[in-house]
Image (spheres, rainbow, N blue to C red):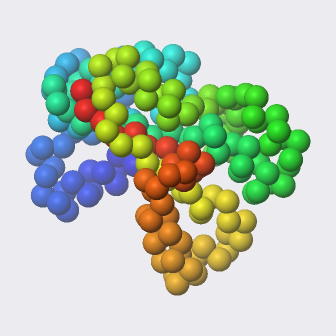
Amino acid sequence: MISAGIERAARAGVSERVAFVEADVSEMPREIVEGQFDVVLCHNLVQYVDDTVATLAAVLAPLRAGGIFSVMAINQHSAPLALAVRELDLGAALAALGTDQARTATFGTGITLHTAEGIGAALSGLGGTVLAHYGIRSFCDYITDDDRKHDPDFFAELEKLELAVTNRFPYPHTARMFQLVGRV
């Protein structure tokens, strides 16, 4: 993802204004100082850490006053729906209602699922203000015919539908992922 970001920054002519840092969020490199950046992205990280609040504090620290943050994570509310619809495992879906723990097939590891409400409260406690809550993959992850998603016409329609509901209630609450955008 960092390589893709570097390439996109170069194509957009903003390479000199963009920094990509690969680091352990709990041990930020010395060159990352408080109040240094206008925008910080924390995408697909919080579900993998033990101390969510400390991680979010580390993520927000490099932002200037008025800086923008974006936090994305797997949506805890989507777990039972995904298990029931995609896996047809109603027992697992029922069990998912009572836990924030799951396993990811991508990395074969345990994760902690979060809600936008919970992460939003943590961000507020750290001085952040959530300005928008978006849902990502509101339909795509629940369509079981994965081959159909490779059809360009079907995918174009799916993309239109996804974009139409990204911030339309109730879809952000059931989307497979949530995104919170805000300021410090």
Q: Is residue 93 visible?
A: yes
Quarter of the image holding residue 62? top left
Horizontal and vertical percent position of residue 111: 63, 31
Q: Is residue 145 above or below residue 142?
A: below
Q: Is residue 13 left or right of residue 170?
A: left
Looking at the image, residue 183 sits to the left or right of residue 166; the answer is left
Near-viewer residue (20 or 54): 54
Q: Position of residue 3 (x, y in %)?
A: 34, 50
Residue in view at x 43 percent, y 48 percent: 134
Which residue occupies 17% across, 35% down? 38
**For the view shown, which residue lies furthest in the front direction?**
169
Residue shown at the point (42%, 43%) measured from the top left: 133
> Is residue 80 placed above or below 13 in the rendered structure?
above
| 120 sits left or right of 127 in the view | right
Residue at 70% x, 36% y: name it: 103
The image quarter containing residue 182 is top left
